[in-house]
Structures are given as C-alpha cells and as structure tokens.
Amino acid sequence: MIFGDKWVPRDTFEPVVVGREEDAYLVTEELYELHNNRKQLKGQLSSTYYRLTIPFAPHMFGSGKTTFCINYLELIRRLSETSLSSFASDSSKKAFLDRLKDSAFLYVDLRELGRTDPEERSLKWVLFYLLYNSACLRSGFEEPDPEECFEIFKLRTDMLIEKIREVLNMRTDQFLLVVFDEVGVLGARERFFDLEVSDEGKVFPYNDFFRILWELCLEDNLFVIVVGKSKGLRIKNSVAFGPRVLLHFISLSPLSSSNIVEFLEKSTLKGQVQYRVCDILCSSSFSVYELAEALLECTGGVPGLLTRSVNMLLNYVQTRGQPFMLKEECLSCMKEDDFQRICAEPFIQYISTSDEDKKSEFGILLMMALYHIPFEVYDELNSESYLFDAINEMGLYRYPIDQDTFQVLIPKVFVGNFEYLSSLSLLEKILLGSLKLEPVDCFFSSKCRVFEGIVAIRLILMLSSKVRNEFRELLCQLSAIFKEMKLPIREPSPLDYMRSVGVSESRSESNKKRKTYGSNEWNKIIQEALYFDKVYIPVETNSHSPDIMFKLQSPIESKVLIVGVACKGRWNSERVGWSDIVEEAKKFLVPIHDQVLSNAPDKNHCMLIVVSTKLAFNVSRELGDQSRCYSSGMSIESESFTIPSNCELVILCERDVEMLIDKEILNGLEKAFSSTDRPFLKNFGLDLLKRVRHSLLSWQ
C-alpha cells in the first residue's frame, strides 16, 4: 500500500445525522420544561421549586455536538412519529412539539468572540451583537454596523429579541431556538471583557455568560442550547444563581453498528450525489455490515473519528480507482499504522503534551475503561469536575449508561497511538495494550474481573521487577521450580497485554462444579502461552479454571514456568475448603501435565497459585497461618490427590495475600463490591483507584 499524502483525509462526502433518538428526546424534554415553567422563572408564580433548565452538552471534539444542534429541528421533525411519539402522547407536549418543529433557528459560534465597539469590554454586548448578526446573515442582509446596533438595543434584551424577530420575519407566537456553540472559548478569552469579580478576587466567565442566558430565557418563546468543549462540571458548580439555574448535561451517545450502517448507506459523495458511500467502499462480496463492525471497533462509535475514517477510506478507493473487493483488504487498510496515526492525530495532542498530574489522571481513566467502572455525573467525585474535565480535555468519550451515569470509552484508534508515547509508564502501556486487544464490551465486566485484573498486573509487575520484594522471596522459599527460574526475568516485561479467553460452553452456577477447558482448548492456549508473552483471563466469571494464566521464562536457562492463578473466595458468603482447592489443581495441573509438560519435562514446568481473601477455617488451621507449597509427587491425603511431575500447588494464606494486594485495597474492594456485581464509582471510590494505581506503579 502507498501511504503519505494519499492518507490525508479530504472531506469528500456529506455524512448524514444518525443515532440521535435519545439525545433528541432529552433535549426536547428540557426545552418543554422551560416552556412549561417560564412564568415561575419570571416570578409570576410563587413556586420555589422551579429551576431554569438550559440543555448543555460539553464534550470532546468530534463527538457530533455541532452537527446535532444544527440538525436538531430537522431531527425532531423526522422523529416526531417514532422516537418522540411517547413524548407527544400528552396533548400539551404534542402542541409544544408541533410549535417547536416550526421554530426559527439561530446559530452563534462563540469562537467569533472578541472586542466589539462601542462597548468593547462588555460580554453582554458582544453576545447581543453576534445574535443579531446571525439573524441578519440568515435573512440575506449585510453585516450590521455595531454602533447603530448599540444605539438601538442599549443592552436591552427585549429590544434585541424584537429586532431579531423583525429581521427574521417571524410570527409573534413563533418559537426562536438559539444555539451557542464552542462555549469553552470563554475560559481562554475572559481577558477581553470586564467580568464580575468575586469577593476572593476571582473571575468566573461562565457565571457572567449564563446570567446573560438567564435574561434571554425570560423572553417568551425563546429557547437556548449551549454546547462546546469546556471545563465540564466546573461550569455547573460555579454558576451563582442559587435555585434559579440548572444546567442539564446532554451526553451524545456513541453510534452503534446499525447506526453506522445507516451512516454509510445514506451518506453521499460531494459532487456525485448519485453515489452512496457504501457503493463506493463495498463491492457485492463485501457486506456493509462487516464494514460497519470494523469501523465501530476502530472508532468506538465516535462520530468525528468515524467521519474521518470513512473519508480516508474513500480517498484511498478513489486514488486507486476501484472499491475494496475483499473485506480483508479493507480491514488491513484500517489497521495500518499510518491510517490510525493520521486518523487519531487531532485527538491525542493533549495527552502527549500533558504534565505529570494529567498523566496520572490518564492512568486512572485507563483503569476505569478497562474494568468498565462507571461513574455518576452528580456524585461527590465530580464536585471539583475531576474526571469530567480529564475526559473532555484528553479527547476521550463518555459512554452513557443512563441519563446521569457514564463509562469511559477509549476507541482503539486512540490506543494504538497513545501506546507509543515514550512518556507513559509501563503500567499505562499494559492497560493500553489490553484495551487495544479486547472489544470494548467483553473484558472486565464484574467485581471478579476487577479483582483478577489487579491481581494479574500486580503479580506480573512484582515478579518481573529488578527490585527485591517480599513476595518474590516468599515464592523462592516455597517453590524449588520458582527458585531455579533465577528471576528477575529478562527484559522486556513478559506482560505485553492481557487477553480474555472465552469458550462456547455455558458455565455452571456452582463453584464446586466448574468446568475446565477441553483438551483441544488447553493445547491451543498452552502452546500460545509458550510462544507469546500474554496473560490470559477467561471471559466468563467463575466458569473455568484457572482465573488467570501467564508465562515466566528464565533469563539464564531456557526454562518456562506456566503460572495459573485461582482467585478463590471473592467476598462471597461461600467458604473455601480443601476440596475446592484440590479441584482447582486437578482442573489445571493434570491436563497441562498430560498434554504439554510430559513432552518436554526438562524445560516446561507449571504452578497453580491459589489466592484467597476468605479461606475456610479448616484450610487456615491446616496452613498454620503460613502459605504452603505442594511439589511434584506430594500427596494431599485427605483428598487422595498427588501433584503431577514438574508441577506445584501454592496456597497463599490471607496474610500473604495482603502482601500481594495490600490490606487497605482489599478492604476497599470488599466494601465496593458488597452491594453490586458491577461496581459504581461512588462505591469504588477515587481514593481506592488512586491507591491501586500507586500500588501497581511501585513495582514496575
């Protein structure tokens, strides 16, 4: 393939707006709330519960904010009989929706903010002028003279709206919808204006901005939407109108595979409107659905990335003069480093130039994305807009679970570029490598996944570290095989990435009846582990043994140690007995010995480490509060099981588990996971996340 300038994306097609049903519904609901309670806003009713609602969508660039707002009226006209039909089931809401569809529309780009004579330092005057200028240009008039405008308006909101209605030739009862885009520029241009100063001598430009919007919303039949890359919830929390203003954060959802199919089938080439995009990209042998899945995996459904990716594919098709005949051809094209680098360039600038504090935030966001840990918009974590700002500023994406709850989404096209930043730590590279490998919806999805992921990373970092540590010395004391490995292992770290392993068989509900892998599956998994440095974690929780598997290789001799980790007793009421531990050993050690170790007894060895946070009392008594190792040929008489040759079973007592995962982290995880299998960040806690990250970094 030929790259370089041919990969630079050119805007060769007109994408359609798709997948915005929920977003359109939410915005319409908030606008109706303003319409229905405007008398309370004006003080004409005595209710103290009403708050001015302004739909507000701060988000990353490329998420589709501007496109959504510009097309909002068209969207509600299109969706009024489908997605908005339930909204319009109430007669008053239906009447509102009918009037809203007939609204006049004004778009104001706040990037045009600047000093405007004669009141050059008045933010209110500049906003008034931009509004009126937008109305004039929309009606085909020339740009108005600022001094004449000032003489007419005198900063009176009612005069401004009256003049706008006159210029737009609006009916007296017709709605006016105003969109203020790119509100984030206020933070960079506050020096241009005389703004209100707090008692502490601080200036909050968004306070002034939303006070002006509050005045605008006093006018009948006027509605406002504000969007932009911003400082997130800091805006909400610094707005000083008490109970009078409430900003509703509209989260634009990532596109689904079916959305992308619609996007491809309905978008057309500029200047060649008879050609749909999918006709250009796909031959009859290449399904548009397959292409949609590939684009979804690459972009995470982020509209800006999607549009950029499709443009690049179109440019390549047009350059060579024929469509992709095989899907493999197209997929290999998208996986090329140059393709991904150019596609992601505008989105990764921030993190690549960030200071250490921001990079630590990035590490926490990676953990949240990998473990699928959601967070709530209005919890105490966001009182200082910590994660909200970090996500927006770093160009990441918030995946909405519901109206107030989100997950961090990092599209693979980002991951491939972040991965090569020399300034990132080994931990961040491990997390990125894991995200790059796994589909966004099939890795860690429960409390067990989080615990197993932390155990896996901590183990591999401790075992590969050149720094002396108690845990590695403990294994050397317990295990003859481990001592012979003469760690630390060779560089680079054996953990290039974690990989989930799934099978088609359904899992058993009982821990005591868990299945192991079939012989063909074991053979494939072990052979891969012998040749590649990967950590395997089964996809299904509690379905197979072990929970984690990785390889250690001696730097001096060609000895390979396959390590399995069984995480028993994960904060549930079910105690662990000797029979449970022996069953784990049988499932793992016996098939590996029979299929793999017996073929190369001098080189290949295997160890199962049983990690538990709540061992049964009889196990604790048997261990004598000390970890135990059963080596080749040793028998566990009570269970009639003999350890196969070249194998070992290591059982860690609770005290040594706390050395592996410190007690405070264990206590925090137990608290977070006590109420739900899918922990929310309000239960998980930012302090715990920080502690986990610090713990992992300490061993790299």
Image (cartoon, helix red, strand yellow):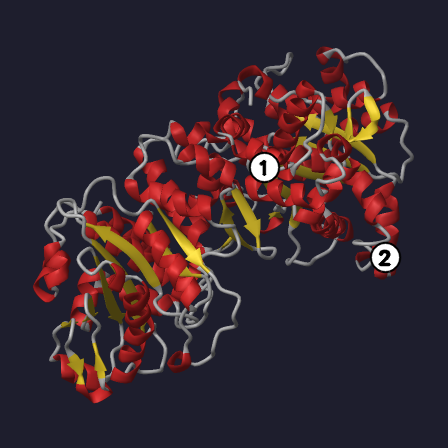
- Label at residue 353: none
Q: Position of residue 603 (x, y in %)?
A: 19, 55
Is label 1 in a helix, a strand or a loop? Answer: helix
- The quarter of the picture where the C terminus appears is top left
Q: Residue furthest front?
A: 599
| Mark with earlier residue (1, 2) | 2
> Quarter of the image holding residue 679?
bottom left
Q: Is residue 508 above or below residue 222?
A: below
Q: Residues within 10 Å of mark 2 (few under 14, many from 20)?
A: few
Q: Is residue 31 visible?
A: yes
Residue shown at the point (15%, 84%) measured from the top left: 621
Where's residue 197, x and y in %?
A: 46, 31
185 vs 613: above or below: above
Residue 638 vertical position relative to residue 332 in the rendered view, above or below = below
Tell me, for residue 92, which label it has, or none: 2
Residue 240: x and y in percent read 53, 43
Residue furthest out toward the bottom: 638
Instruction: Give amino acid for label 1.
Output: Leu
Q: Which mark is residue 331?
A: 1
Residue 15 or 98: which is nearer the viewer?
15
Q: Quadrant of the N terminus?
A: top right
* Amino acid at dot 2: Ser
Q: Secondary structure at mark 2?
A: helix
* Left or right relative to 590: residue 309: right
Q: Position of residue 389 (x, y in %)?
A: 46, 40
Horizontal arrangement in the rendering, residue 217 relative to residue 555 (left or right): right
Q: Quadrant of residue 266?
A: top right
